Each structure stands twice: as structure tokens, then as C-alpha cells.
Amino acid sequence: MSQPIVVMEAIVKDFPNVRAVDGGRFDLRAGEVHSLIGENGAGKSTMMKTLYGLYAPEEGRIVVRGRSFEALTPAGAISLGIGMVHQEFMLVRELTVLENIILGFEPRKSGGRIDFAEAEGRVRRFIDDYGLHIQLHKKVNAISVGEAQRVEIIKALYRGAEILILDEPTAVLTPQEASRLFEILKTLTASGKSVVFITHKLREVMALSDRVTVMRQGRHVATVDVSATSIPDLARLMVGRDVFLGVSRADGGAAGDVVLSVEDVFVPSDKELSKLRGVSFELRRGEILGLAGIDGNGQSELVEAIAGLRPVEGGRIRLGQGEIQNRSPLEVRAAGLAHIPEDRNARGLNRAMSIEENLAGMAFRRAPLSRGPLLVVGALRRFARRLIETFDIRPARPEAPAAHLSGGNAQKVVVAREVDEEAQVLLAAQPTRGVDVGSIENIRRELVRARDRGTAILLVSADLEEILSLSDRIAVMYEGQITGLLDAEGADEESLGLLMTGGALP
Amino acid sequence: MNKSSTLSTLVTVVVSLLFGAVVVALLGHSPAEAYRELFRGAFWGRFNFGGTLERFVPLLLTALAFAVSSKVAVFNVGVEGELYLGAIAAAWVGAALTGVAAPIHIGLCLMAAMAVGGAWAAIPGALKAYWRVNEVCVTILANYVAIYITSYLVGYPLSAGTGVPQTAALAATARLARILPPSRANSGLFIALAALLVTWWIVHRSTWGYKMRAVGENAGYAEHVGIRSRVTMVWGMVFSGALGGMAGAIEVMGLYGYFLDGFSPGIAFDGMLAALIARNDIRLVPLLAFFLAALKAGSLGMERFTGIPKSLVDAIIAMFILLAAMEGLFLFRRGARGKEA
């Protein structure tokens, strides 16, 4: 067994009012992929930002190749061969890919000029060695997310990284891009580089890594060989108890009347005319209709069109008795719609407000939360406490600012607000994206409960496992059209995958 | 506002005063003496303290006006124009109406001023909400339009016919009582404090305020939960303009007793500074407005007794703005970094 090249011991890191990491421990061997997993807020990113020198720990020791440090700086970390690809890319959008890669480390010619030919030669070597296909002379704002990530990886390698830290790299990728990334990482480790892979997707951990370290609430829980563990084991270590992600479908019985019908709807997107081209489906009382598809095939536009947030070009949408296309969001909601939006930061939450004010986003219009123009503070607080308890939102303080919520708890606030409306129809767009395992379980359970109460749910998800485990019927979208509609019993990943990529079922 | 940002506001105040002390020392005076006279000039005796209160009222109301518009994400530089229009509206109602009981007359004057100020502010509000026209440009330019409109009105239709461009004197029933003679402090103070409470209540305890804050802080969220953000933005500006108009009305009804051409030396801009230093927190606005008012009032006494120019106070206030804008300066990093053990 090779000697570890990085050892982090007894790391303690405090933020105002929070101890983010408490006794963190981590080690990395040459040539391995070591996954670091944990729920949102478990301290994974903080731990690795400490290694990359972005944070100075209060206590603890970092040993890199036998040299011991109390704390590192990013410049120091880079000179030790540590590189990091952050969740949010650190690229200058107005510069070309090549300029971004060499920024700060430009090869020079006489007279202080940048030697672009030399730079390009060096970068090409990485492209060829590791199969990192990128277009060097395009501006960053013209390339895809997957390509931007490869640019970040090359940037780290160009700076001499032997140890590569990737912070939730697959969160922004399509499944195809993710599998490409995994191949790249395997080439990297085969040539002796080491990879730290931060994630909370357990299947990726099993597929990719050699060892895995689990963190929970800032503490080190376990470090195990992947060959000696399983997904349920890891989930239990992460959450601290048994987890059942596949919600048992209590067989909601026969679905009821049609409550939402979409007929031949055409919708333009921001860039394309007619992003949706003649979409029709019906949604019944007491059922979950899963809408599967690769991101960007029109699911977002469909949801926004139904919710009144996007104009409809042609076709009809009926909710209950009336037509709701091209009505304002308030009118659509009054007709009986609730909506968990796909982006909780852009639409789902108001981070400047408190948790209770976010929970009351709909209910503040009615008694008992308001009387006429007056908000009733006591009723607001009781309302928030009830939802916080039902949905297990932490911190459980109604007056705490929403800005401090972790991803999972922020999403629970959104779900709580929308599910509590007990509307006829609930649009749930990516309800568990970027959310930790414990919260996923909680959110899925609440969706099924709402279904059992008779709510008709349209579940849009990029996660096939979620679609398969929750839906009664499944529709697949491809390039703005519904290419298939099947019963959940007859569906599996293969048949859905085929429909999602434009194939037809035999 | 949390504890640490209140603390950093406090640090801002202290550092600015220290800066002022250094400047005074460089001018060859004693900083201790300068600040003593500044303090006396602001608080010693009925006249001086009254002078502070007299400046506090319009500063508070214009700062509130700015803070309210910022709740709906509009940067309203046009409060000065709203103040002028409100002032002349109050002057007209105060002089044209006679034979009404004082409380009703005062109420009518204030309502006229608020209506005119609110309507004027609705223009940039609607331009921004419906056509995305930059409100900073519009409100700055609208100030000139508003001030020249009042100049025309006071010069011709509403002129008192004296050599000075001013309107006819208000009826006695429209005047606000002096509370600390011989200073000009008046019962407008209580109207302003009531406006402060009502404004806080509306912004933080009413459904309308909830909508305003939702729109200002995250318009996408507001739209999602069915709040009509454009309408809310326009009404937020009407609210802001009404407070600006009220500030002008109290100046006319409490200080002058008539409208005087060009009476305001940019009061609303000082109010805007108070709101900016308070980061638009309605609870901090009165403290900052009072602090600026005391500085302004005290600077007269300081100049009279020490010879230090009163524009020093403007330099201190400018220092505030700079420091408030770089609050990161006071966030110290703990621990040495990059050290090899």
C-alpha cells in the first residue's frame, strides 16, 4: 500500500456561529480517486477548501508529501501541486479558453509579450494526453457547461496539479457529460495523479472511486474501500440511520378525474421559437405523472407555461373548469395550482427574508395570517412552526434568515410552502436536485402523501431513479415533444433512456 | 440588521470622527475644543437643540423616502424634487383655504403634498417597472424639472407680489406650532415620528410591505408566488414620493410659513446619505438622520466659536459614506496564514 501524499488531521474550522468542521480527517494516496461524501452542510467543501488554502483552520495539521502545515494559501497549495475545480466555475467569460487557462501563469517572450504559441503547445499536450476535448480559441461565454468544466481541469493541470479536487462536478452535467468526465478522471489516475471527488451521489461514488470518506455534521464518520461497501451502507453512514429512497407506493388506487389537461401547446423559449411543439397530456386527480427527459428538452418551459410564468403561443391548458394559458401567476394559482420551481434561488426563495416569511409566500394573503392589510405576527409564527415541524426544517427557528439555510433545508422550505397549499395540481420541478439524501427521503415522502390526499402531481426530474420510484405514469420529453407515455409498471431505465434520446420503443 | 453590521456602522461613525479630529489638528486647532463646540452647538440650550430638531425632521422624512423606494429596488434620487413639489402644494392649500379648523387644514395641506409628491414619483417608477428605463437618470433629471416648475409657480401664478419670489403667507390654521422657541423646531417633529412608525409598520407588518420587500429582494420569487411586481414597484415609488412631499410640506408649514424659491439646499440628498449609511434599515434611519442633523446644526456653533469652517462637517459626512461603502475593511482575518509549522 502506497504512502499517503496528503494527510489532514484533527481539522477544526469555525464560521460565525457555526463549527463547520470538527475533527475532520482525510488522507489521499497517489493514483487513487477518493470520494468525500456527506449531506449538505456536512463540511465536505469546507474540508477541501482548507486543503486548497482558501480557509485557514482553527486547529489541526495538513501534511503534504511529508511537509507539515498549520494552514495553506492558494498560492502555496498550487506550488505543492494541488488544484481545485469549484462548484461555480472561476472563469473570465470574456476571455478565450486559452487565455483563461494560462491566466496568471503566462509563458513570456522578450519585451513582456505573452508567448501564445508556447502556451498553446503546452495546453495541447494535456488535451491529447487525457482526452480533454476543448476549443481553445472560443470565448468562455460561448462554450457549454461540460466544456467549461474540462477547461477548469486543464487549468489546474497546467498549473502543475498532481492532486485534483473536484467539488460536486456532476451537479451541472448531463448524464452523457458525466460519463465522459469519469473516463477523463480514470485516465488521470492511470497516469499517477490523485483525485478528490466531492459528491452526494452514491452511485457515482461506487462507479468511480477507490476509497470513500463519509462526513456527517462536520465530523469524520468513516473511511472505507469501495469494494467493501454498498450504497445502502454509505447512505446509512451519511444520514446516521437507515434510509429508504424508493418510497413504497401505497398503490394510490385508481386515479380520478382529469384536473389538468394540456392540449397541443406551443411555447417559445428565450432563444428558440417554438421550444415546445404541440405538447398534449392529461393529469388526473391522485396520480403522479413523471416527466422524464434530458435537461433542456423543454421540460422547464412546459412547467413555466403552465404556471403562468411564460407566454403560450398556441394551444390550450385547462385547470379544473377554466383555461389558464397566458394568465398571470396569481390567477393560475387561484385556479388551483401550486408550483415547486426548479431553481430555488432564482424563484423558490427570497433569501433576504426569514424562514417564516418564505413559508408564508402564499398564505400571507389569507386569514389567519393576515387581516385586511395587517399581517398577524402570532399567526404567522404558529403557521411557520407547524410547517417547520412537519417538514423537519433545520434550523427550526422561524425568524432565522433564509440565507443561512443549507440546500436541502432551503428546498424543504419551498416544498413545505407549495405542498401546504393543498392545491388541485402540484408542479414539482426537480424537487430534489442538489439536495442531500436525508432531505430527498423527506421531500419524496411528502410528495407521495400529497398524492394520496388527491393532489395531481406533475413530477419533472432529470433523475430517472426518482421518476421510476415515484410515478404512476411516465411521460418522456424529447426536443419539445412528448415521445412516449407509459405506465410505471412497464417502464425501466433502458426504455426511458431510449425515448429520452429520441429513439422509439419497439 | 444583525449585530455585526450594527457594530460596523458604529465603527464607521467613530473612524469618521477621528478623521475629522486629524483634519482639525492639521488646521492648527484643538480637536477636543472643536468637538466640544460642535456638541454645544447641537445640544446646548433650547435654541441649539431646537436647531438640531429642525434639521432632523426633513432629514428623517427624506431618508425614509429613499429607504422605502429601495425596498422595491428603485434607487430614488428624485426625493428633492418631490420635496419641492410637496412644499408648493402645501403652500397653495395653506394660503388658498381659509376658515377651516386647524387640524383639518393641516391634514389637507399634508395630503395635498403627499399626493403631488407621490404622483411625481410614480412617473420614474412606472418607467422603470414597465419599460426598464434607468430610474437614476430619470429621477436626477426630474429634480430639475420639478424645481423649475416650482420656480415658475412661485414667480407668477402663486407669487405674493413682493420683491422676493415667495408665495402668500399660509393661513394661521395651516401653521405648525413652534415647540422650542426661539428655535424654529415645530410640531412637525411629531408628524415625522408618526410617519416613521407608520412606515416601519407598513413595510414590516403589512401585506403590502411584504409584497414590496419580496419584489425588491427577489423579483423572480415575487413573480413565482403571484405578486404583481410592476404594480408593487410603482406603488412603492408613490409611497416614497409621498414621504418626500410630506418633508416639503413640513418645511413650509413649520419653518417658513410660505414657499420660498430654492429654499432647500439639497436636504433630500443629505437624507439619501443617511439612508445609505443606515443601509436602508428603517430602524437605523432615525438614528443616522438625527446624527447628521446634530452634525449640521453643531457645525454652525463650531465655526462661530473656533473659526473652523463648517464645511469640515461635510467632509466628515463624506468620510462616512466612503467607510460605509467599504465595510469589508473592518472584517479582520484571524490567524496567520501560509506558515509552515
Image (cartoon, grey):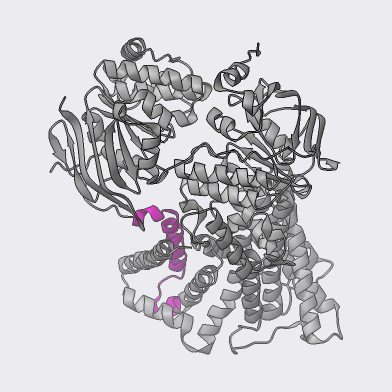
Is residue B144 found inside the magenta-colored segment of the image? no
Q: Residue at x 35, y 11 (%)?
A: A124
Q: Residue at x 17, y 43 (%)?
A: B339
Highlighted magenta segment, given as a residue range: B302-331
Indicate the quadrant containing the N terminus of chain A: top left, top right, bottom left or bottom right: top left
User: How far across and how far down the image is residue A155, in percent?
Assistant: 35, 23
**A216 on left or right of A395:** left
**A475 on left or right of A180:** right
User: How far across and how far down the image is residue A371, in percent?
Assistant: 72, 68
Is residue B320 found inside the magenta-colored segment of the image? yes
Indicate the quadrant containing the C terminus of chain A: top left, top right, bottom left or bottom right: top right
**B12 on left or right of B243:** left
A174, B326: nearer the viewer: A174
Corner quadrant of residue A471: top right
Prevalent SS, magenta region = helix
A269, A415: nearer the viewer: A415
A361, A291: nearer the viewer: A291
- Indicate whether A391 appears above or below B182: above
Residue A114 appearing in the image: no
Q: Residue at x 63, y 27 (%)?
A: A489
User: How far across and how far down the image is residue A208, in percent?
Assistant: 36, 24
User: How far across and how far down the image is residue A314, in percent?
Assistant: 81, 28
- Indicate whether A112 appears above or below B109: above
Corner quadrant of residue B264: bottom right
